[in-house]
Each structure stands twice: as structure tokens, then as C-alpha cells.
Amino acid sequence: MTEPTVVGFICDWSVDLKPLTEGGHLRELPHVRIIRVPCSGFVRPSWLEETLTRGAAGVFVTGCPYGDCLNREGNFLMRDRIEQLQRRLQRRRVDPARLGMLAFGLHDGPGFLAQVKAFVERIASLPAPAPARGGRPTVAQPAAASEGDAS
Amino acid sequence: MSTATTDQATGRYARSMTALLRGTLRLDVWINRVYPTDFNPLYYTGGLSNLFLLTLVLSGIFLFFYYEASLGSAFASIQYLTERVPYGGVIRGVHRYAADGFIVGILLHLFRNWFTDRYLFARDNPWISGMFLLLFAGFVGVTGYQLVWDERAQLLTTLVVAMLYSIPAAGQGLVHLLLGGVGVSDTTLVRLLYLHIGPASALYVFLWWHYLRLRHPKIWPPGVWTLFCVGLVFLLAGVIPVTQDAIPPSAPAARPTQFPMDVFFMLPFWLMNILPAGGVVALLVLLFVGGLAIPYLSRRETPAQMEVRHAGVAQVVDGNCTGCELCYYDCPYNAIVMVPSPGPGLTKAAANRTLLAVVIESRCVECGICIGACPFEALELPKLMERDVLNQVNLAMQT
């Protein structure tokens, strides 16, 4: 398997994953691993950062269509948080294209797959792979994380 | 009823609700192909109703200044308003069509939130206040038709009185209260005017209750939809004037037996063709009580059967909370309140805190949005903790 791993955090209420997945990854794109979350807004930006640090080539979050979040605001909040994280990581020379926010409804499986494919292709065309550092980075500790957020 | 039949009935209900949910979301996919998702009108049914309500209030204030609440001059004052006052007829039409739009908006809002499960568990508060909003809106609509005091109003009043009489024990008293005496008199119209404006004002009290547990409620549709709806109402008022039915004024001798229908407000009165008055009253009461009971009785299945994750109410990790209020601003249900901190936290960032976040359990829907908001690891869902997620990330990276 030469293709680099991509991790997706997917809201329970958005795309129906039953026909698309097989043992924790997408059937059509086996290098895209899936983690289910109760709402896209549940995802803490530091986890996305952590996933990249542990060697993932890219990470994306999927929520309901904008305006139709079951919990009213989760996907808007997540979109903003991902934009912030992209700006923050750009200063550390991580390409913003490695982070993505998608929004698809329960029955929009084909559209979802198409956009994931586009996301993966975009990452594959990026020049340098994400710098993989071993171990838990210092930024994940609470005090340091606060400085990261304030900056 | 045996348990088996109950299960069967619940199963049928659950299946039909699932089908309705699928239908609603399919419709969304189609609409989203035409509009960007931020402009899907079905995402703004509540805001659209609110827009129509404001239109109603503004046009209603205008109409109020010309209305005379007495048997002899009520119809004449409305005729004067429609024919002599500049744009009076248009404003009257706006008031009529905005009311129809209001009811349509409320019903769409009700069905959409019903079919997409947005009333379950801790979210019963907007649902209950919404049922009261619907009840009051219907009542205000009927009294509005009575105020015109033409033959339709006369017949409507007769039907309302018949419905009230059919209520056991209290009926007679209620009729006396409504008419202000044993029969229709000038007092009746004064009471009707109050029963039109009083409950309409009460709608705003219920709206306050409706929004009470929602942070950043979407109270207004996007600008283009505001323009479109206001324009549509004015266009309808101009193209189909409300006077086109030409209903004669009410006269004591007249015995009207039929009137032009308004499907949005007159449905109960149409039902009186086939049901006795008492039956219609019982049906309305049943619908209202059933509506109130929906969040409590209609849980289709257990959360496990619905394959809903039961993550547990969010818990604040006292030692890590810095009192930064980020979760408080992001919680969509106002379930997090900030209280004065009883003491310093354990971490360096939390050492100088003045506030502490507290989760109100009865309002929490276990969505986890506060977890994403917290950069200090001070909130956790008990059954899906941060270390579980990071374990899953590890697992995904290994395989």
C-alpha cells in the first residue's frame, strides 16, 4: 500500500456510512480511515493536529449540510475551527489542503465519495509529505495548548 | 392492549416516521441542487414564520386605527378602509395573505422538526411552546375573520358558539364570556377585537419561551427570502384583492348557510359539515394534547434501536477548567452556565480562574460541541472520552 493514510471524522447524523464502509475504512478508498463522532462539532482541533503529527497525510471532518445540523450549529462551528487550525498550521509549513471540512446529508453518499476522492487526490499532488514526528507533541498539553490558541 | 400489539403499533409508527425522514432529506438534496445550502428555504421555516408575524403586526397596527368595534359600523369602517383610504385595500390584503403564510410557515416548521427528530429528549421546550404558538395563531386567525362582521363572520360566530355550547359544564359560561351577554351585541365585537389583539401579543411571549434554550436562534431568513416573501404578499394583495368574494354585510335577519373557505384557518369549521360540534371540539383538543405528548410518547425506538450513540451528559473536569467561557458561547442549547469558581483549578492555566463551567444535565443533548470548543481538555463525554478518540486515531494509523 503506497497511498498515505487519510483519517476522516464523520458525524453520526450526516452521510449514511453503512453502504460505503467496510471495517473502519471506505470500501472504495481503503486508505481513508473512518472515526465516527456524535456531531462534527465534537472534534477538538488538537485531535486533528495530533492525527497529522502521527503520520496521516490528511484529515477531514464531515458534518450535516450547513444550516441543517441536527445540533443547530455544530458544522458552522467546526468550519470556523478548521479555518483557524489551517491558519495556525500554515505557520508551521503544513499545507492547509491537508485539512478539510465536508458537509453532506444522510442520502448524499455519492457526492460525499466524490469530494473525498478530490480531497485525497489534492493531497497526493502535494510536494512534501507531512513531517512525521514520533510521540506525543508538547502542544497537546493544556498549558502549552493555551499559548497555541492565543497566538 | 397487549404488549405485542403495542410493539406492532410502535413498529409501524417508527417505520412511517423513518420513511418521512428519508423523504424530507431527499427533498433537501433536491432543493440544495437549486439553492446553496445557506439559502434553502426549508432550513428557515421558523425565520419565515417570524417574518410573516412581523408583517402581520405592522399591517395590523395600520388596520387597527380605522376599525370601529360596533355592530353598525364595523363592516362600514372596513369598507371605508378598503375603498377610500389610499392603499388600504392592499394593506388589508397583506394582512390576510401574511396570515396564510404564517400558518403555512408554522406547519412546515412543525412537520420538519418532527420528521427530523429535533424535538427529542432534552429538546422538548421549543416543541411545547411551539404547540402553544400554533394554537394561539389559529385562534387569532378565526377572530380576525369574525372582526370583519360580514355574513361569513356571522356564520362563523354561530359555529363558534355551537362549539362552545358542546363543551360540557363550562360551555354556557364560555359563550356568555365570548358574547358579553346572552346574544350578539356591540360588546361582542369589542371582545372579539381584544381576542384578536391580546393573543397575537401573547405570541411574542411564547416566542420568548420558544427561544429560551436556543443559543443564536435563526430568527430571520436570508435577505433575499425576506424580500421575496414580502414582495409575494404584496403581489397577491394587489392581484387577488380580498374583496373579490364580495360577501354582503351581516344583518340580523340574514341566515347565511355557506361562505368562501380559507383552507388554513377554516378547516375545523368545514369539519362541522360531517361531525357534530362536540366531535370537532374533541378532535381539536385531542390534536393539541397529542401534539404536546409527541416528545414524550413518540420516541420511535430506544436509542439503541435508533443506533443513536449514547455518549452520556458532558462532564466538566474541574481541575482543568479555566473559566474561559468558550463552551458557554458555543453550546447550542444554553446547557452550560458559568458560575463563580469555588477555588482554583489544578493546572497552571486554571490556577487564576474566576469562573467555572457547569453543565445543566436536563438541557444537555450529548452532542459534544462543548468538547470541540474546549482547548483545555476540561470537558469530556463520559462514554466517548478524549483517550478513546485518540486510541481510535492510533488504530487507524497502525492498520
Image: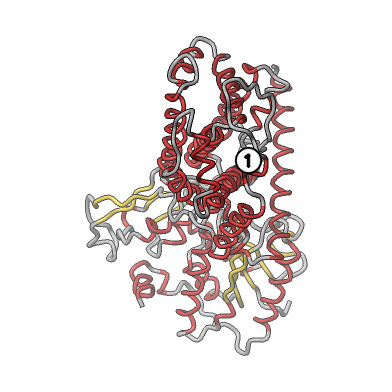
Identity of the residue drawn at 64% across and 57% down = A14
Left or right of B205? Residue A74 is right
Indicate whether B226 appears above or below B117. Answer: below
Q: Quadrant of residue B269?
A: top right
In the foreground, B244 or A66:
B244
Q: Is residue B122 visible?
A: yes
Indicate whether A64 appears above or below B8. Answer: below
Indicate whether B306 appears above or below A55. Answer: above
In the foreground, B176 or B268:
B176
Q: Give percent across and percent down for residue B396.
A: 62, 66
Q: Quadrant of residue B226?
A: bottom right
**Three-letter amino acid code of the residue under disc 1:** Ala
The quarter of the picture where the N terminus of chain B appears is: top right
Numbered marks: total: 1
Identity of the residue drawn at 37% across and 63% down = B376
Identity of the residue drawn at 57% across and 45% down = B96
Q: Give percent across and percent down for residue B322.
A: 30, 60
Q: Secondary structure at mark 1?
A: loop
Q: Which chain does the residue under circle 1 lie in?
A: B
Q: Which residue is mark 1?
A: B304
Q: Residues within 10 Å of mark 1 (few under 14, many from 20)?
A: few
Left or right of A127? Residue B346 is left
Indicate whether A151 appears above or below B1. Answer: below
